[in-house]
Image (cartoon, rainbow, N blue to C red):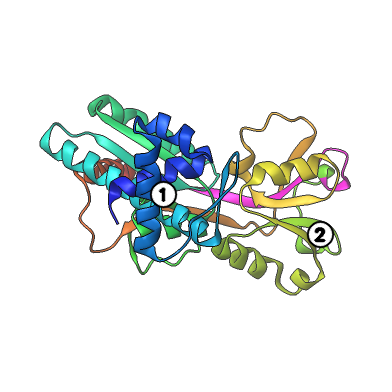
Amino acid sequence: MEYRDLKYFLVVAREENVTRAAEVLHISQPALSRRLMQLEDELGAQLFVRGKRKIALTPAGLFLKRRAGEIVELTERTRSEFSAERDAVGGVIAIGSGEGEIMRFLAETMNEFGSRYPAVRFDIYSNNADYVQERLERGTLDLGLLFEPAELSKYEYIRLPHRDRWGVLVRSCDGLAEKRYVTPEDLRGRRVFMSMQRGAAMGVRDWFGGEYQKLDVYAGYNLLYNAAMLVDCCMGAAVCIEGATSLYKNPDLVFIPFYPELSVSAVLVWKKYQPLPAAVERFVEFIRQKVKDAAVG
């Protein structure tokens, strides 16, 4: 199974038409069809259902599309990293993160680092901790930002100088919006939306204690934006961290912190026992020094 064939396959899957894909790839349609049939023969599986106007992926094709995307991304990142090693410090640093005020610290650090190493670029992937850890395992992310509690045994990490408060996002017309804090009892029997991040969910459950079983958990979410839409439509309250709401400009949405206070720290993580590309290693050391300076200051 050649790398080139995987790229061909991904273009065909995207275009849903072999003729159109051949034009994009600048090869002949018969040559592309032949490569696809050879790929199917090699894998012993039918990858496409061929119709008159377009083709569709079979279950085996959908599986290969996911795996081929990971292989192509990792191959191209590896080539970029070797190129960066030959030249000045450069390349792409891929970082995964959830939503939170800690991104402001990261953005400031990226800006300072970029002034020193202008050949470095960044890819930012936003999702929950489970997604970030999965991509770290596959090697398609260099670094991840995780909120604690988190399982850190597989990672090297730097604890970052910021904490975020947990609370609820509610409509301004909600009775809770008049309160300075919300307690577990305040949310008893109310419809709420909860983060699906395992570590975060564990910490929130501990805070609720016995009241957790009395919540009406109507929906789970991985990033806050869509959950905030549900709140704006008067469907309930979103349990979230304060930093995830900081850029919302909707005057009808109000964040109310928990009492007793529940706050979380963030850690920058990367896989243990794995040599880092030069740009990533420099960036990690840059952050480590920035955190030390902040502690002294």
**Residue shown at 62%/45% (left/top)?**
242
In x, y percent, where is residue 28?
A: 36, 34
**In this picture, residue 51 sits left or right of residue 276:** right
Vertical relation: 235 (above or below) 115? below
**In this picture, residue 96 sits left or right of residue 26:** right
Q: Do the CB atoms of the residues marked 1 and 2 lie less than 8 Å apart?
A: no
In x, y percent, where is residue 130?
A: 51, 60
- Residue range corresponding to the magenta coloring: 159-176
In x, y percent, where is residue 35?
A: 35, 48
**Nearer mark to the viewer, of 1 and 2:** 1
Vertical relation: 146 (above or below) 76? below
Secondary structure, mark 2, is helix
Residue tagged by mark 1? 69
Secondary structure, mark 1, is helix
Say which of 220 and 8 sits in front: 8
Q: Work out how far the residue at label 1 is from the one at label 2, CA to CA, in angstroms.
A: 43 Å
Q: Quick one: label 1 or label 2, which is nearer the N terminus?
A: 1
Q: Quadrant of the C terminus?
A: top left
In x, y percent, where is residue 86?
A: 11, 36
Amino acid, disc 2: Leu
Report whether residue 102 is seen: no
**Residue shown at 40%/58% (left/top)?**
40
Vertical relation: 35 (above or below) 211? above
Amino acid, disc 1: Gly
Q: Quadrant of residue 115?
A: top left
Q: Quadrant of the N terminus?
A: bottom left
Residue extending furthest toward the left: 86
Residue tagged by mark 2? 187
Q: Is residue 171 magenta?
A: yes
Say which of 22 and 181 sits in front: 22
Q: Is residue 158 magenta?
A: no
Residue extending furthest toward the bottom: 210
